[in-house]
Image: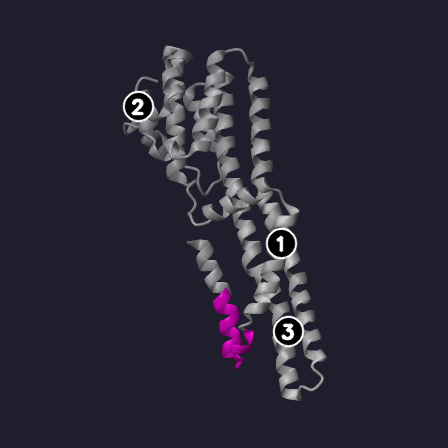
Amino acid sequence: MLIALGLIVVMLSVFGGYALSGGSLGPLYQPLELLIIGGAALGAFIAANNGKIIKATLGAFSRLRRTNSYDKALYLELMSLLYNLLSKARREGMLAIEKEIENPAESALFGECPKVVQDPMIVTFLTDYLRLMISGNMAAHELDELMVHEIEEFEHEAHLPVDALTKVSDALPAFGIVAAVMGVVKALSMADAGPDEMGLMIAHALVGTFLGILLAYGVVAPAASRIDRQVGEAVKMLQCMRVTLLASLNGYAPQLAVEFGRKALHSAERPSAGELEEHVRNGKGAGAGNA
């Protein structure tokens, strides 16, 4: 997993480089400094956020363990599903797909796309707007405004953990300085200590500054950045569905509507037109052959 690999590289580079330069790792082991810095950061995080944001942040951390699931294979499944649903609706009428979207778990078309079905966000967004399209009571621009509004709200809410973690990252160096100042105060208050003991206590105090900066820019900031990337990937997925459905509403054939959605993807995950055509042709959906 890339985030774990990155953290390992950070720690090996920092501590390994220090050790190779002749430094002793012993003085860097200061659990009480970690308690001061980590406890202060945690307390500030709790004080600055409500229960909803705290829960969302913990949930975002749990998702960091997973690799990127929004890859080319998922997009191929999604666009194949969109093509088959829109083809069936164009051929048999919008009411023909009502049973498909009312219970995706038992739908033959959804069943051919297990990666899509496993993502509640995709299934909910797709079925909600197909249901609105079936109702036939909304113009294309009205449905587009609704989709844009929902995507913006999703993005705003999904960025709340990023904002919370970024603020913690910004505060950690200051908490490191607090721990360091407290250590220096402790050292200077021991007037009867010898030079060697005094030097060791000041060295221990300065570890607080080091730990605060390391945790901020080596751990918390990368985690916030990774969550931000995941939010961007989810938004791109929603935009792909929005563009495809909007093209269909504007009268484009399913082949062209799906092409609109394909063009909305990043080049790294975007399947070629040939790959998508082959994916659909190779039995991915009963509606493909009769479109």
Magenta region includes residue 19: yes
| x 65%, y 78%: residue | 202
Other-residue count near label 3 (Cα within 10 Å), few / some / many at <14 / 14–19 / ≥20: many
| Above or below: residue 51 compared with residue 135 | below
Other-residue count near label 1 (Cα within 10 Å), few / some / many at <14 / 14–19 / ≥20: few
Task: Give the mark toward the camera: 1 or 3.
Answer: 1
Other-residue count near label 2 (Cα within 10 Å), few / some / many at <14 / 14–19 / ≥20: few
Residue 195, quarter of the rendered image:
bottom right
Determine which of the numbered discs, if any, sits on residue 5 in the image.
none
Mark 2 highlights which residue? 108
Mark 3 or mark 2, which has the lower sequence index? 2
Q: Nearer the viewer, residue 219 or 241?
A: 219
* 197 sits to left or right of 101: right
Decide whether the magenta segment is chiefly helix, strand or loop. helix
Mark 1 or mark 3, which has the lower sequence index? 1
Residue 8 appears at what percent x and percent y?
Answer: 46, 63
The amino acid beneath tag 2 is Ala
Q: CA distance from mark 1 to mark 3?
A: 21 Å
The amino acid beneath tag 3 is Ala
| x 40%, y 29%: residue | 79
Mark 3 highlights which residue? 205
Mark 1 highlights which residue? 43
Residue 251 appears at what percent x and percent y?
Answer: 49, 15
What element does badge 3 sit on?
A: helix
The N terminus sits in image quarter = bottom left
Stretch in magenta: 11-28
Q: Is residue 272 visible?
A: no
* 275 sits to left or right of 222: left
